């Protein structure tokens, strides 16, 4: 059942939106919050694609895992609470999307 | 805290996507699944607007409640499981969005 | 015909995305690029709502005009090329959406 | 310059939304309008990814070309005006996205 993966993607979109919003005011030394901007749209696309049992769901899950992996690395390098929460939700999304696409 | 409302919107988008996908193959006697198509985008917008604490969050919550109210009425008139689940998630979203915008 | 307004919304989403991406690296003295983040999703929703002749198209056009008006003011206060292009596309979107919703 | 490809994706999203809305009322003998539903979100994601010069733009363009190719085949098999316009915009999007990703 893909419900868990849908929820992981949606939670990731929420955390990335909060991280993006916060990081607009903070100087970044890496690709954060560009990675959050990227994650939001791909995670939401991925969740809807799974919900409709899309024939492209596997391909979109692989793309989503790649984007979230990048975001987990970038945000994970920052100690802000929003970055750490974002990185953690990204790591869960990577794991869940890779399992779906396997 | 708006976490509950974000999750209500995201769940509604998931249920509406499943209902839309199923109803494409089924003759409808009302505005279902057009209402589901409408709900998906507005619910996802609403969730992200709340996540970033948007100055338009209240206005978007009111719009989202209106769209979900319409969808709850349309899908609620059908006995398919996907329509009943969709209508139920819409009703919860209406309640949560109206409380947020109040 | 709403084709002109659809294209104004889509162009605005493009310019706002470019402005958002650029302003992530630049200190802002106002609500830019938060306004761009907001515009992107609302403009894209608005374009799709018009394309499907949604019963909520007028309400969404009014919301879109309000968001774009705010963004035009914020980005218009900056002299960067991307901000000026963004503000100009927002002003056109405001005008077009208000005409649609009238 | 990717402006042409962005506009091809946006036009495709518009035509797919119109085709989806029309086909909800019409019995289909193939995957139309599921293909239109799929195209809308992927085309809009693709346009925004190009606008922000995303590091995933090539991967998203390849995905978009695959989705649009499928949609062009499905809608191209129908003689409705909206299906023919949708198929034509999908074919242009395929060509443009493949050129971008090359």
Image (cartoon, coloured by chain):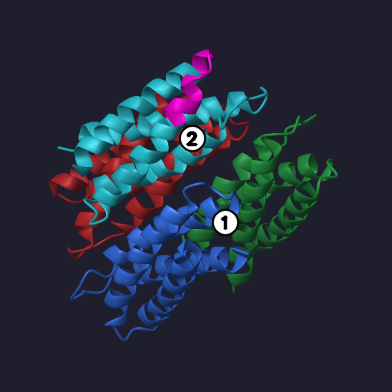
Chain colours: A blue, B green, C red, D cyan
Q: Which mark is residue D26?
A: none
- For the image shown, how many numbered marks are present on the structure? 2
Q: Which mark is residue B58?
A: 1
Mark nearest the camera among 2 and 1 is: 2
Secondary structure mainly formed by the magenta segment: helix
**Badge 2 and badge 1 in a common chain:** no
Which image quadrant is residue D34 in? top right
Front in this rendered view, residue C75 or C53: C53
Q: Which mark is residue C48?
A: 2
Which image quadrant is residue B31 in? top right
Q: Where's residue A44, x and y in %?
A: 48, 56
Q: Where's residue C101, x and y in %?
A: 52, 29
Q: Where's residue D67, x and y in %?
A: 41, 39
Element assignment for label 1: helix
Q: Residues within 10 Å of mark 2 (few under 14, many from 20)?
A: many
The magenta segment: D71-82
């Amino acid at each position: 059942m893909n419900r868990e993966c849908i929820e992981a993607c949606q939670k990731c979109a929420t955390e990335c939106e909060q991280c993006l919003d916060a990081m607009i005011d903070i100087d970044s030394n890496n690709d954060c919050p560009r990675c959050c901007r990227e994650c939001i749209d791909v995670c939401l696309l991925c969740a809807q694609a799974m919900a409709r049992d899309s024939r492209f769901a596997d391909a979109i899950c692989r793309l989503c895992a790649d984007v979230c992996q990048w975001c987990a690395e970038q945000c994970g390098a920052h100690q802000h609470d929003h970055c750490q929460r974002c990185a953690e939700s990204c790591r869960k999304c990577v794991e869940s999307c890779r399992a779906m696409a396997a």
